[in-house]
Protein backbone atom coordinates (compact mmCIF):
# COMPACT_ATOMS: atom_id res chain seq x y z
CA UNK A 1 0.00 0.00 0.00
CA UNK A 2 1.37 3.38 -1.04
CA UNK A 3 0.61 6.46 1.08
CA UNK A 4 -1.57 9.21 -0.38
CA UNK A 5 0.40 11.57 -2.59
CA UNK A 6 2.95 8.92 -3.60
CA UNK A 7 3.03 6.57 -6.57
CA UNK A 8 5.15 3.81 -8.01
CA UNK A 9 6.62 4.25 -11.46
CA UNK A 10 8.89 1.73 -13.16
CA UNK A 11 11.87 3.19 -14.99
CA UNK A 12 15.45 2.48 -15.92
CA UNK A 13 16.13 -1.00 -17.26
CA UNK A 14 12.49 -2.07 -16.99
CA UNK A 15 11.36 0.91 -19.04
CA UNK A 16 13.99 0.16 -21.70
CA UNK A 17 12.95 -3.50 -21.77
CA UNK A 18 9.31 -2.57 -22.36
CA UNK A 19 10.27 -0.15 -25.13
CA UNK A 20 12.49 -2.74 -26.82
CA UNK A 21 9.75 -5.37 -26.53
CA UNK A 22 7.30 -3.08 -28.32
CA UNK A 23 9.81 -2.46 -31.11
CA UNK A 24 10.55 -6.17 -31.38
CA UNK A 25 6.82 -6.92 -31.68
CA UNK A 26 6.88 -4.83 -34.86
CA UNK A 27 10.30 -5.83 -36.21
CA UNK A 28 9.91 -9.63 -36.04
CA UNK A 29 6.66 -9.90 -38.07
CA UNK A 30 7.96 -7.29 -40.52
CA UNK A 31 11.15 -9.31 -40.95
CA UNK A 32 9.20 -12.51 -41.60
CA UNK A 33 7.03 -10.78 -44.21
CA UNK A 34 10.17 -9.35 -45.83
CA UNK A 35 11.79 -12.81 -45.93
CA UNK A 36 8.68 -14.31 -47.54
CA UNK A 37 8.49 -11.54 -50.15
CA UNK A 38 12.20 -11.92 -50.98
CA UNK A 39 11.70 -15.66 -51.40
CA UNK A 40 8.83 -15.05 -53.78
CA UNK A 41 10.95 -12.52 -55.68
CA UNK A 42 13.83 -15.00 -55.94
CA UNK A 43 11.78 -18.05 -56.96
CA UNK A 44 8.85 -16.43 -58.77
CA UNK A 45 6.84 -19.30 -57.33
CA UNK A 46 4.46 -19.22 -54.40
CA UNK A 47 4.86 -22.97 -53.91
CA UNK A 48 8.65 -22.92 -53.67
CA UNK A 49 8.58 -19.83 -51.46
CA UNK A 50 6.17 -21.46 -49.03
CA UNK A 51 8.16 -24.70 -49.02
CA UNK A 52 11.31 -22.82 -48.02
CA UNK A 53 9.44 -20.60 -45.55
CA UNK A 54 7.80 -23.62 -43.90
CA UNK A 55 11.11 -24.32 -42.19
CA UNK A 56 10.88 -21.05 -40.24
CA UNK A 57 7.97 -22.00 -37.92
CA UNK A 58 9.58 -25.37 -37.27
CA UNK A 59 12.90 -23.73 -36.39
CA UNK A 60 11.19 -21.18 -34.14
CA UNK A 61 9.29 -23.96 -32.39
CA UNK A 62 12.58 -25.70 -31.70
CA UNK A 63 14.04 -22.45 -30.39
CA UNK A 64 11.15 -21.88 -28.00
CA UNK A 65 11.38 -25.49 -26.85
CA UNK A 66 15.12 -25.09 -26.20
CA UNK A 67 14.52 -21.91 -24.19
CA UNK A 68 11.81 -23.66 -22.18
CA UNK A 69 13.93 -26.73 -21.46
CA UNK A 70 16.83 -24.57 -20.31
CA UNK A 71 14.58 -22.32 -18.23
CA UNK A 72 15.71 -19.20 -20.10
CA UNK A 73 13.12 -16.42 -20.39
CA UNK A 74 12.18 -14.98 -23.77
CA UNK A 75 14.27 -11.81 -23.91
CA UNK A 76 15.35 -9.22 -26.43
CA UNK A 77 18.51 -11.22 -27.11
CA UNK A 78 16.43 -14.33 -27.73
CA UNK A 79 14.20 -12.37 -30.12
CA UNK A 80 17.22 -11.25 -32.13
CA UNK A 81 18.45 -14.84 -32.07
CA UNK A 82 15.11 -15.99 -33.47
CA UNK A 83 15.51 -13.58 -36.39
CA UNK A 84 18.95 -15.08 -37.08
CA UNK A 85 17.55 -18.60 -36.70
CA UNK A 86 14.88 -17.76 -39.27
CA UNK A 87 17.63 -16.71 -41.67
CA UNK A 88 19.47 -20.00 -41.18
CA UNK A 89 16.26 -21.98 -41.74
CA UNK A 90 15.56 -20.06 -44.95
CA UNK A 91 19.13 -20.54 -46.17
CA UNK A 92 18.83 -24.28 -45.57
CA UNK A 93 15.60 -24.37 -47.57
CA UNK A 94 17.14 -22.30 -50.37
CA UNK A 95 20.02 -24.73 -50.75
CA UNK A 96 17.60 -27.67 -50.76
CA UNK A 97 15.27 -26.17 -53.40
CA UNK A 98 18.21 -25.05 -55.56
CA UNK A 99 19.69 -28.55 -55.46
CA UNK A 100 16.35 -30.14 -56.36
CA UNK A 101 15.93 -27.72 -59.28
CA UNK A 102 19.48 -28.51 -60.43
CA UNK A 103 18.75 -32.24 -60.39
CA UNK A 104 15.53 -31.74 -62.35
CA UNK A 105 17.34 -29.67 -64.98
CA UNK A 106 19.87 -32.48 -65.35
CA UNK A 107 17.02 -34.87 -66.07
CA UNK A 108 16.87 -36.68 -62.75
CA UNK A 109 13.55 -37.22 -61.01
Image (cartoon, grey):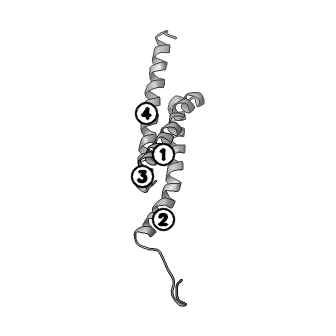
Q: Percent from the top left, x then y, of residue 82? A: 45, 46
Count the numbered circles shown.
4
In this view, the residue farthest toward the top is: 107
The crowd level at tag 4 (other Cα within 10 Å; few <14, some 14-19, many 20+) is some
Judged from the image, the secondary structure of the residue bearing numbered disc 3 is loop
SS of the residue under disc 2: helix
Name which of mark 4 and mark 1 comes first in the sequence: 1
SS label for mark 4 = helix
Circle 3 Cα neighbour tier, 10 Å, few/some/many (<14 / 14–19 / ≥20)? few
Q: In this view, does 81 lie above or below 25?
A: above
Query: How far is mark 4 from mark 1, CA to CA?
Result: 20 Å
Q: Residue at x 51, y 87 (%)?
A: 6
The residue wearing badge 1 is 64
* Percent of width and height locating residue 54: 54, 34
Q: Which residue lies furthest to the right in this view?
A: 46
Which label's residue is closer to the chain start, 2 or 4?
2
Q: Mark 3 points at which residue?
A: 72
- Separation of marks 1 and 2 at Cα, in angstroms: 20 Å
> Given contact means CB atoms under 8 Å apart, are the residues at marks 3 and 1 in contact?
no
Element on which disc 1 rests: helix
Residue 42 percent across, percent down from the top left = 50, 32
Q: Which residue is drawn at 48% across and 45% down?
A: 64
- Sequence-wise, the earlier of marks 1 and 2 is 2
Which of the 4 quarters of the picture holds residue 76? bottom left
Q: How far apart are marks 3 and 1 (CA)?
A: 10 Å
Amino acid sequence: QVPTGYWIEYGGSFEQLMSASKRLAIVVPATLVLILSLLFWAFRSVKDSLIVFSGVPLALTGGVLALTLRGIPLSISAGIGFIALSGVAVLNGLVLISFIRSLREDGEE
